[in-house]
Image (tube, rainbow, N blue to C red):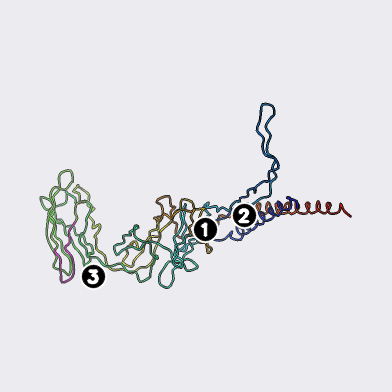
Amino acid sequence: MLRSLFAGISGLRAHQTMLDVTGNNIANVNTAGFKSSSVQFQDTLSQVLTNAGAATATAGGTNPAQIGLGVKVAGISTNFQQGAAQLTNVSTDMMISGDGFFVVDKGGEEMYSRAGAFSFDSLGRLVTPDGGFVQGWAADATGAVDTNAALTDLTLPVSTLMGAAATTTASFEGNLPTDAAVGDVLTRQIDVYDAAGGSHALTVQFTRTAAGWDIAADVADTTASGTGSITFNTDGSINTVTLPTLAADATVGTSAITLDLNSLTGYAELETLAASDQDGQSAGSLQSFTVNADGTVMGSFSNGLKQAVGQIALASFTNPSGLSKSGNSLYSTTVNSGDPQIGTAGSGGRGTLTSGSLEMSNVDLSAEFTNLIVAQRGFQANSRIITTSDSVLEELVNLKR
């Protein structure tokens, strides 16, 4: 049989594979996080008719004479170029800007995805459209996240609470005017909290004296009260300060409170005294959340505070093209992908996260339709090889009539 027949058959098979890959790319043009693939061809083993000859003193060298036996698919590679961003304004939709993959637990197997179309299930777990659990790290009661801990299902139930904390420090800042008249009184007030989250008004009075200012502090509904004083140098800096002692009240549940006055100044003709901050808080329930660029999920609570409730994990690979497509927009590791390097977004070469957007397919339709034409013409040309070879065989058969 003619070698050209089998070369043509190999060409048909190779270009059929190219048609299949191109068709799959076009079919997934609107699949979030989809990465297009491309086919690489290579020639097969060639049959040697004449080996190469070495040059001698009396004769020149000769080149080998070989006939190729067709084409084969050398590989199908995945293009991990960044896809375009599509704004969805859905808080659970996330896009990776740069390298990296979301880590997903699907049926107990760790898999990886670029598609960030997530949602919450009835138990508050962040899941993929087919029910896989998005992996990350949970925050503790103080909002701290240990990224060295084992990965866990990222959960954000609506029953999430921020615990109350008793106030231990109340801060004041601004300027006390040194040209104020003796006897002038400045009063400032700030809410402080007991261990159960109950609020109490902390009132602090600053009374001008000949030497400086007397301080009187009192926490409403408690036994905590005290007096002190503060004086300033001529350059407006603090000279001496005696802080009021605000002892704990076990009956109400308040802790001992220390006043922080280190930011006060004493300049003339300027009165900007203000209660700036305190470190206590009331209890609060989760109202909403946002996702930072590093994957930290920040919860907004009913007490007006924000605190981290978890962090999304990302994985990176030495050779992402070595990953195996497992369906449902998921990838799994292979012996040639390398082990996953788990970490936070924006570190270790991993991209950053954008909430409220999705990464669309990186399929270039103009290029794919061009590849479709190339594959079609290649298929037709190889089929012509077969028909031409068949005509030659027909002529050979007809030699004997």
Q: Residue furthest top?
A: 57
Nearer the observer, 51 or 42: 51
Q: Mark 2 packing: few (<14 Cα in 10 Å), some, or many (20+)?
A: few
Q: Secondary structure at mark 3?
A: loop
- Residue type beneath disc 2: Leu
Q: Mark 1 packing: few (<14 Cα in 10 Å), some, or many (20+)?
A: some
Residue at the spot 12% in from the left edge and 61% down from the top edge? 226
- Residue type beneath disc 3: Ala
The magenta span reads: 247-259
The answer for how far apart the CA atoms under marks 1 and 2 are is 24 Å
Question: Is tag 3's residue or tag 2's residue first in the polypeptide sequence?
Answer: 3
Q: Position of residue 133 (x, y in %)?
A: 44, 66
Q: Position of residue 369 (x, y in %)?
A: 65, 54
Q: Tell me the residue that label 3 is attached to.
A: 196
Q: Tell me the residue that label 1 is attached to.
A: 324
Question: Is tag 3's residue or tag 1's residue first in the polypeptide sequence?
Answer: 3
Label ID, residue 365 = 2
Q: Residue furthest right?
A: 401
State yes or no: residue 250 in magenta: yes
Label ID, residue 51 = none
Residue at the spot 21% in from the left edge and 63% down from the top edge? 167
State yes or no: residue 317 in magenta: no
Nearer the observer, 393 or 55: 55
